[in-house]
Amino acid sequence: MSPSAILTAFLTIVLREIRRFTRIWPQTLLPPAVTMTLYFIIFGNLIGSRIGSMGGFDYMSFIVPGLIMMSVITSSYANVVSSFFSMKFQRSIEELLVSPVPNWVILAGYVAGGMGRGLGVGFIVTLLSLAFTRLEIHNLPVMILTVILTSALFALGGFINAMLATKFDDISIVPTFILTPLTYLGGVFYSIDMLPGFWQGVSLINPILYMVNAFRYGILGVSDVNVFIALGMVVMFIAILSTIALRMLQRGKGIRH
């Protein structure tokens, strides 16, 4: 395919994905906004007033970066896993398989679409957070880089989950039993400095901890982990998942039967 044809194919997939989640915005954009608002009210205002400060900041300011990242992670993942599996279920994926579109363009299109929803929800949650606290950006490049890389990573994860899923129940297993626990234990609501030494070590195994703390550093300037190590880990995971997803597409794993 020529470069112009590749660009057209990529933009077609991306625009279709964006139109898909904006068309059903009461199901894709509104629920995360409502959920995060409840977190701000319950954890930030009610519980936070009793906890006091954490990491040198009031509790509301401390948890806002983590809640923004939580919304980005879940939305990026959910968009790709639901969209690609629906294509499989409706058998419209065959149109892409018989087309001359390269596999990497298909993958990039779905990932970009998932990032569109994830970053859009993150922006909405950020605006909502301004009603509860004041955000002062400490390092804008780190903040933007972290949220973009994290969104891409979990969009890739959603793509792999969709390829492996054989029924609709399969696309909810990973978010329910893996993604949600890792997110809650990823330092969203607390600093790992509060934990005993053993559990601090266990927490360092959680990859979401690094993403949340890198984003928190970008906003507040504090982090429980080295920011450069955190960003390096995210890039490494993106490379690994991209390779796996492309290999699965090439072999037709879960879509050629």
Image: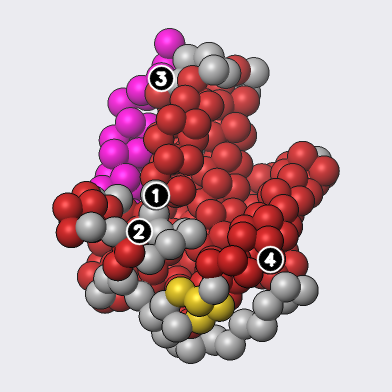
Provide residue 63's location: percent of width, then percent of height: 54, 66
Q: CA distance from mark 1 to mark 2?
A: 8 Å
Provide residue 103's location: percent of width, then percent of height: 41, 40
**SS for dot 4:** helix
* Nearest to N terminus: mark 3 or mark 1: 1
Q: Which mark is residue 254?
A: 3
* Nearest to N terminus: mark 3 or mark 4: 4
**SS for dot 3:** loop
**SS for dot 2:** helix
Q: Is residue 9 above or below residue 211?
A: above
Q: In this rendering, would 238 be left or right of 200?
A: right
Q: Which residue is mark 4?
A: 45
Q: In this rendering, would 230 be left or right of 17?
A: left
* Circles 1, 2 touching at the beta carbon (< 8 Å): yes
Residue 252 belongs to the span the image colors magenta: yes
Q: CA distance from mark 4 to mark 1?
A: 21 Å
Q: Which mark is residue 185?
A: 1
Q: Residues within 10 Å of mark 1 (few under 14, many from 20)?
A: some
Q: Which residue is mark 2?
A: 209
Q: Is residue 184 above or below residue 90?
A: below
> Which residue sits at x=57%, y=60%?
67
Dominant SS in magenta: helix
Q: Which mark is residue 101?
A: none
The answer to whether residue 37 is visible is yes
User: At label 3, which amino acid type do we have?
Assistant: Gly
Q: Nearer the viewer, mark 4 or mark 1?
A: 4
Q: Quadrant of residue 40?
A: bottom right
* Nearest to N terminus: mark 2 or mark 3: 2
* Nearest to N terminus: mark 1 or mark 2: 1
Q: Residues within 10 Å of mark 3 (few under 14, many from 20)?
A: some
Residue 248 belongs to the span the image colors magenta: yes
Which span of residues is magenta-colored? Answer: 235-257
